[in-house]
Every structure is written in structure tokens, then in C-alpha cells.
Image (cartoon, helix red, strand yellow):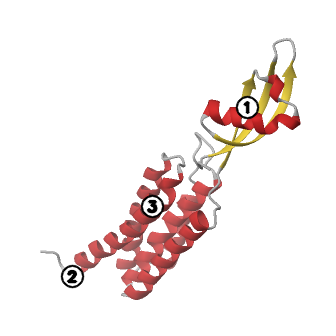
Amino acid sequence: MLTGDLTLFVAGFILNFLAAFVIVRFIYYPGGRCNNYVFTFRAFNTVIYFIMWLFTSIELSIGAGFGLFALFSILRYRTETVPIREMTYLFVMAALPVLNSVLWGFARYDEMLIANVLVILTIWILDKAWGFNREQHQMDVIYEKIDLIPRERREEMLADLRTRTGLNVYEVEVLSVNFLRDTAEIRITYSNNKG
């Protein structure tokens, strides 16, 4: 049987986990974004919750909490550039357990619940309902149908690129044309959205 403090610890963890799960699984993940970050979001959220619970349970100064964020600020992902949207989700996943552990530690359960619901609702509105989820990607392509390059045939070119690549291509820029090989180097801009 769990003691009172351990019961509170587990209950707070479950509520924090559920809030983070809703954000990652039902807001971030369905957007077709890079799913490599799902592990990072969940791991950051869980570990920060445990560390902040330790800080609040042994009554360390708030300076220790800022020290934790300073530690995270020196982390850099050197293998690839992390898109700004993923960095925003990472910040939310890092800030949420700080908020939850502090409010739970001071027995402000109603405020914690309201704060989590408002965070989830705000992210959902911004990411889904208002349509700010068009994530832009660019790719350079060698294109052989140079008869579609003139600006007046741009819609045909976009339709052809959508069919051939399976991507939601919505913009194309001609970088260079090689008339000897009847090819063009183009830059396509596409999003992960279906429409």
C-alpha cells in the first residue's frame, strides 16, 4: 500500500503524463510531422516532472529550478536542425511538468487542472482549428517536362508534381534550365497536409 506522499507523487505523475499524452498523441502526432520527436517530448516531460517533484519535495530554492532550465539551454541537437514548431512543442513539454509539479506540490489541484486544460486547448486551437499547421518544406528536383515550365502552365506543372511525388506541392520555382538535356532544376515547396 502506498504512503500518502507516494500516492500524491504517483497521482501527480499520472495527471502530468495524461496532459502531455493528449498534446503529443492527439495534437502533434496526427499532423504528419516528424515522429522522431515523440520520444524526445515524452522523455523530457517525464524526467523534468521527476526532477521538479524532487525540488519541491525537499524544498530546494527556485534558483535550482532555473538552474535546471540553464542546463537544458546548453543542450543542442547537432545531427539536424530542429524546426521551430518542434522546438515550441519541446518547450511546452518541458514547461508543463514544472507547472504541474509546483501546483501539485502546493495542493492547488483545481488550478493545475484548469492550467492543463487551457494549455491543451490553446495548442489545439493554434495548431488545428486556426489552420496554422501548414508546415513548409522545400526540395530541389530535376524535372524533365520543360514544356510545363512557362508560367501560364504552372497549374499543370503543380498537378503533375503532386501526382508524381505524392506530396502536397503548392509552389514551384525554376532555378535553371538545361536545353541540351531537356531538363530543369526546380525547387518545390510542399506541406505535410493532405489539402
Quadrant of the image containing the N terminus: bottom left
Residue at 57% from the left image edge and 64% from the top image edge: 128
Crowding around mark 1 (Cα neighbors within 10 Å: few <14, some 14 to 19, many 20+) is some
The residues bearing labels 1 and 3 have C-alpha atoms spaced at a distance of 32 Å
Residue at 35% from the left image edge and 73% from the top image edge: 15
Res. 112 visible in picture: yes
Identify the residue under disc 2.
Answer: 4
Crowding around mark 3 (Cα neighbors within 10 Å: few <14, some 14 to 19, many 20+) is few
Dot in front, 1 or 2: 1
The earlier-in-sequence mark between 2 and 3 is: 2
Residue at 83% from the left image edge and 34% from the top image edge: 153
Res. 58 visible in picture: no
Identify the residue under disc 1.
Answer: 140
Q: Amino acid at mark 3?
A: Phe
Q: Amino acid at mark 1?
A: Asp
What element does badge 2 sit on? Answer: helix
Question: Does 177 sit above or below residue 40?
Answer: above
What element does badge 1 sit on? Answer: strand
Identify the residue under disc 3.
Answer: 26
Of the pair 65 and 4, the residue shown nearer to us: 4
The residues bearing labels 2 and 3 have C-alpha atoms spaced at a distance of 32 Å
